[in-house]
Image (cartoon, grey):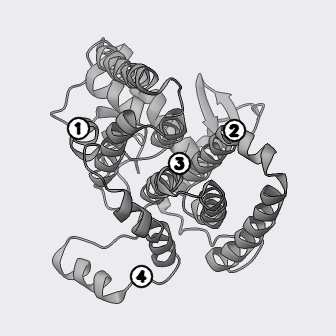
Amino acid sequence: MLFIGYVVVSDNDFSVLLKNFIILIPIFTYIISTGNYPNIIIDFFNKYSDKFQFIKAADLAIGLYISVLIINKHFKSKTVAFNLSLIVCSIFIPLMLFNSRGSFFSILIFIAFYLFQNHQFILKNKLNFILVLIISSACFFVSTLRVYGNLDFYKEPEAVTSEVVVESLKGITGNKQPAKVFLSFYIQDGYLMSWDPTTDWRLDIWQDVLYDLIEKNQILIGYGYKDIIPVMLDPTAPGRLGRDGLNENVHNYFVNILARGGILQLLLFLYIYKTILTIYKRNHGDYKILILLIPILILSTLDVTMEGVNFPIIFYTYLGYTMKKGI
């Protein structure tokens, strides 16, 4: 996909098509993700596939980021591109927070990179920045009302399963002494844990993977790809396979790489990203590609992204295109 993006896509002029239609992507995905998904599509997937799912937060995020970057590259007016980017991002922030705190954190990082890379434009156009900030704030509150139905950011809690209750009770009764808590995190029995159930669930898996690899002397080469990662089948930690019993993923891109191929494979992947940065710097003289890499890789450490289908295809294809054409 990197090759296709770098060689095939970058050698074709998509500027007219992108300029005319790219803004429709975030608008369309926002509308259908906030209650207007066409029934005909839902019915189609329910009838002809195993299940129907709304667009995941990670897919929303990468669609938004790439749309914003393409808008800024192909719109002739810098002011229009800048204003449009901030307004679209402000609309998506409540949706990201509603769907996933990982995607919410990722979009904040993306916006911070975007503002930093455009700080000179902001300083030269202070009045425009103030006006677009006001408009973006208004869009943010309107989007919050649409997504949450209120301005309290209150989300109806998901049904709690018996497994979660049992695990919580075990954790409470197992704590002989109260732990010192910092930002919901604390250390108990040599494990970093969290008061937040979802965060704690993931932290527990990631640390179990590391300890199990070390204990089995497989930290160098990993488990391989034949079977489910062993800690996901741990009978003392029910619920790791999810409600439908089909989850096999540790919800962390780098932990998954470590589990499957050990330290050797992890080093190879890190070398790939170092090479990408080196090529971009050689071609364009800066590291602006970090506005894409950092938010996506942060998001991938908190969710199932690279182990899916569409996310890595979109990411690596556009990454290849950007290495050639620049941000």
Q: Position of residue 146 (x, y in %)?
A: 64, 79
Q: Residues within 10 Å of mark 3 (few under 14, many from 20)?
A: some
- Name the quarter where the N terminus is drawn: top left
Q: Residue 189 or 240: which is nearer the viewer?
A: 240
- In the picture, the disc for residue 257 is none
Which is in the foreground here, disc 2 or disc 1? 1
Q: Position of residue 94 (x, y in %)?
A: 65, 65
Q: Which residue is mark 3?
A: 167
Q: Amino acid at mark 2?
A: Phe
Which is in the foreground here, disc 3 or disc 4? 4
Measure the alpha-carbon separation of dots 2 and 3: 43 Å
Which is in the foreground here, disc 2 or disc 3? 2
User: Dot 2: what SS?
Assistant: helix
Asked if the residue at tag 3 contacts the one at tag 1, i.e. Cβ–Cβ closer than 8 Å, the answer is no
Measure the alpha-carbon separation of dots 2 and 4: 35 Å
Disc on the earlier residue, 4 or 1:
1
Disc on the earlier residue, 2 or 1:
1
User: Dot 3: what SS?
Assistant: helix
Tell me the quarter of the picture where residue 77 sits.
bottom right
Asked if the residue at tag 1 contacts the one at tag 4, i.e. Cβ–Cβ closer than 8 Å, the answer is no
Asked if the residue at tag 4 contacts the one at tag 2, i.e. Cβ–Cβ closer than 8 Å, the answer is no
Which is in the foreground here, disc 2 or disc 4? 2
Disc on the earlier residue, 2 or 3:
2
Q: Amino acid at mark 4?
A: Tyr
Q: Which residue is mark 4?
A: 37
Q: Does 62 appear above or below 8?
A: below
Q: Residues within 10 Å of mark 1 (few under 14, many from 20)?
A: some
- In the picture, the disc for residue 7 is 1
Which is in the foreground here, disc 1 or disc 3? 1
What residue occupies the far bottom of the structure in this picture? 39
Measure the alpha-carbon separation of dots 4 and 1: 35 Å
